Image: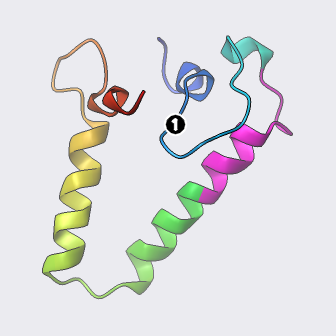
Amino acid sequence: MTLPGDSFAARQHGYKGEVKGSVHELQMTDDVIAFRKEHLARYLTKLVTEPYDGKLVTYLDFVGKIHASFGRKQFRYRWFR
């Protein structure tokens, strides 16, 4: 898997639509791209609107853990498959 493109060809937790077999098959108008953009928009909104309290720190810690590979071949979020 190459980053960041090939991650768009894998099913993300919560996405129910069609997943292409390869990043080379993706189009900017595909539902998976819209889903990822909406997810990113919610995350960025949360970063700038939520109070920086224990709840947000716990959330940010979770997000960091699922997106960090720490030298592993696959990202930790692959357990969602």
Residue 58 vertical position relative to residue 36 in the rendered view, above or below: below
User: Which residue is drawn at the image coordinates 31% and 26% (left, top)?
Assistant: 75
User: Which residue is drawn at the image coordinates 65% and 52% (left, top)?
Assistant: 37
Residue 22 located left or right of residue 47: right
Q: Which residues are magenta?
A: 26-38
Choose between 16 and 30: the one closer to the eye: 16
Choose between 17 and 75: the one closer to the eye: 17
Q: How many marks?
A: 1
| Amino acid beneath label 1 | Gln
Residue 69 located left or right of residue 12: left
Q: Quadrant of residue 50?
A: bottom left
Percent across and percent down for residue 48 are 42, 79
- Mark 1 surroundings: few (<14), some (14-19) or many (≥20) residues within 10 A: some
Residue 16 located left or right of residue 52: right
Residue 33 vertical position relative to residue 41 in the rendered view, above or below: above
Q: Quadrant of residue 51?
A: bottom left
Q: Is residue 35 magenta?
A: yes
User: Which residue is drawn at the image coordinates 51% and 36% (left, top)?
Assistant: 12
Residue 3 vertical position relative to residue 14 in the rendered view, above or below: above
Residue holding disc 1: 12
Quadrant showing the C terminus: top left
Q: Main secondary structure of the magenta part?
A: helix
- Which color scheme is applied? rainbow
Percent across and percent down for residue 8 are 60, 28
Percent across and percent down for residue 16 are 65, 40
Classify mark 1: helix, strand or loop.
Answer: loop
User: Which residue is drawn at the image coordinates 29% and 52% (left, top)?
Assistant: 63
Percent across and percent down for residue 32 are 70, 38
